[in-house]
Image: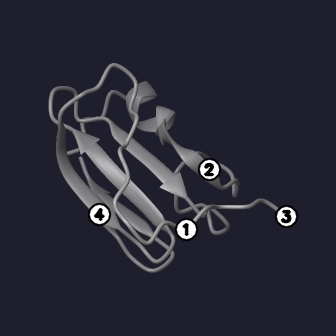
C-alpha cells in the first residue's frame, strides 16, 4: 500500500526548472497544474483510478509531468479535477 501525505496547509511546489503555472485544479486526493510556456500537465497525489494520467494506478507525492501528452505533441490549455478524475482541454 502506498502512502500519500495529506497536507492541511499550503506547501511549496517543486517543479523541474521552475516553470510558471497558468492553471491549477484539485480533486479529492490529487492535484494538477498546467505550465504557461509549454502547456505541460503535472499531476500528483492519489492515483488509484488512473486520474494522474501516467498510464498506471500509482500514487505520487512528487509532481510528475504527464509524458503521454508531450509525446503526442499536445498543449494543455485547461485542467479540471473531479473527485476521482482529471479532465484536460488541449
Task: Name the secondary structure under disc 2.
Answer: strand
**On the image, numbered disc 1 is attached to which residue?**
6
In this rendering, does residue 42 appear at all? yes
Q: CA distance from mark 4 to mark 2?
A: 16 Å
Mark 4 and 2 residues: CB-CB less than 8 Å, in contact? no
Mark whose residue sits in front, 4 or 1: 1
Mark whose residue sits in front, 1 or 3: 1
Classify 10 Å Cα crowding around label 1: few (below 14), some (14-19), many (20 and above). Answer: few
Q: Residue at x 30, y 56 (%)?
A: 88
Mark 3 and 4 residues: CB-CB less than 8 Å, in contact? no
Mark 1 and 3 residues: CB-CB less than 8 Å, in contact? no
Mark 3 and 2 residues: CB-CB less than 8 Å, in contact? no
Residue 73: percent from left, percent from top: 33, 27
Left or right of 81, for residue 47: right
The mark that comes first in sequence, 4 or 1, is 1
Q: Residue at x 31, y 35 (%)?
A: 40
Looking at this view, name the residue that lies furthest to the front. Answer: 9
**On the image, numbered disc 4 is attached to which residue?**
25
Q: CA distance from mark 2 to mark 1?
A: 12 Å
**On the image, numbered disc 3 is attached to which residue?**
1
The mark that comes first in sequence, 3 or 2, is 3
The mark that comes first in sequence, 2 or 1, is 1
The mark that comes first in sequence, 4 or 2, is 4
Residue 55: percent from left, percent from top: 63, 47
Amino acid at each position: 500500500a502506498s502512502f500519500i501525505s495529506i497536507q492541511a496547509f499550503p506547501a511549496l511546489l517543486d517543479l523541474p526548472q521552475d516553470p510558471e503555472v497558468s492553471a491549477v485544479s484539485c480533486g479529492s486526493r490529487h492535484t494538477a497544474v498546467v505550465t504557461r510556456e509549454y502547456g505541460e500537465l503535472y499531476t500528483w497525489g492519489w492515483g488509484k483510478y488512473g486520474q494522474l494520467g501516467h498510464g498506471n494506478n500509482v500514487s505520487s507525492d512528487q509532481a510528475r509531468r504527464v509524458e503521454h501528452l508531450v509525446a503526442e505533441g499536445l498543449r494543455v490549455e485547461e485542467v479540471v479535477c473531479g473527485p476521482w478524475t482529471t479532465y484536460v482541454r488541449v
